[in-house]
Amino acid sequence: MKFAVVGTGVIGSGWITRILAHGHEVIATDPSEGAYERMLKQVKQNWPYAEQLGLAEGASLDNLSFTVSLEEAVKDADHIQENVPEIEDLKAQVLTEIDTYARQDAIIGSSTSGIMPSELQQNLKHPERLVVAHPFHPVYILPLVEIVPGKQTAEAVTVKAEKVYESIGMDVLHVRHEIEGHIADRLMEALWRESLHIVNEGIATTEEVDKAFTHAAGLRYAQYGPFMTFHLAGGEGGMRHMLKQFGPALKKPWTKLIAPELTQDLYDSVVNGCETASQGQTMSELDQKRNEFLVKVKKLAEGYWPEDTASMKKSSK
């Protein structure tokens, strides 16, 4: 199967790594100066982690090619993954060009983290073949992809797209009703906003907020999500008991959800806190530590995740 990847930044390079690791051909395109060199450097840095997770037969960096021509990149592709910056006018322009040059039977997946697919479909001649396919960084390690069909997406395209993403080891979350931010980012956004309030009000530092998550809920959430976590919190009575006992607490004003004003003081507190917690390590060094950690955590978590997920099927081969 031949994939085209449009936009080769962090997310685009992540897609390229994952697709190559599963034995497919990739032709990438990005018009920005120096894009090819940056992409190749990033993919080569990603590759050892893909190797640790297991390569498919025929997987090779030699299956990667690059062109600055969008038309050349997409014209023969079976599947096209768009990853340009989250600027609506830019995405609309690029998707219109992809729609013009791509084969009519090619599927277009957009990596947008917040724009609804129906908005992206507005100017397309073939809107029925577009879905949002939102991954999570690092794409070559984390298996989830949110598939969001738009109002004009053909049902057969959604089904086919899900199979394509599963074929590259991804666990598909079908978002049945399009909504800004999809599902996972909305959950993370709620946590992020509350974290900003806690720092802004001087309750805790950025490092303390991070520790409150990584040393408690973060560890639990790698195995169970919020619902199963609270189900277990109910003891023998499970969620039934938990809701009866703690349900009234939902009326307490514990969370704000509305983001605080990003004042200069809050900006400085967040930036300085993160830079202090980095302990002088470069972003590349922090990336490497995170990736090493995620590979180990993913391998461990797979022993407890449901066995019918695509990533589990791959790891069991």
Image (spheres, rainbow, N blue to C red):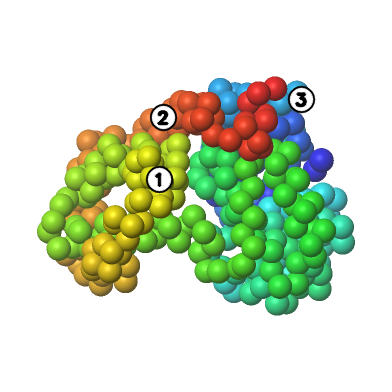
Q: Where residue 191 sits in the image (x, y, percent)? A: 34, 57
- Secondary structure at badge 2 equals helix
Residue 110, position as x, y percentages in the image: 65, 59
**Is residue 71 visible to us here?**
no
User: How dense is the environment of label 3, judged by Cα within 10 Å: few (below 14), some, or many (20 and up)?
Assistant: some
In the picture, measured across the screen, residue 100 lies left or right of residue 285, that is right
- In x, y percent, where is residue 94? 68, 66
> Are circles 2 and 3 on residues that touch, CB within 8 Å?
no
- Earlier residue among tags 1 and 3: 3
Residue at image mark 1: 238
Which residue position holds label 3?
58
Amino acid carrying label 2: it is: Phe
Q: In which quarter of the image is residue 316?
A: top right
Q: Which mark is residue 293?
A: 2
Q: Does residue 16 sit above or below 263 in this rendering? A: above
* 231 horizontally vs 302: left or right: left
* Drawn side of residue 168 relative to residue 255, left or right: right
- Which of the two discs, 2 and 3, sits closer to the camera? 2
**Element under disc 3:** loop
Amino acid type shown at disc 1: Gly
Mark 1 or 3: the one toward you:
1
Label 2 and label 1: CA atoms lie apart by: 31 Å
Of the residues under marks 2 and 1, which one precedes in the sequence?
1
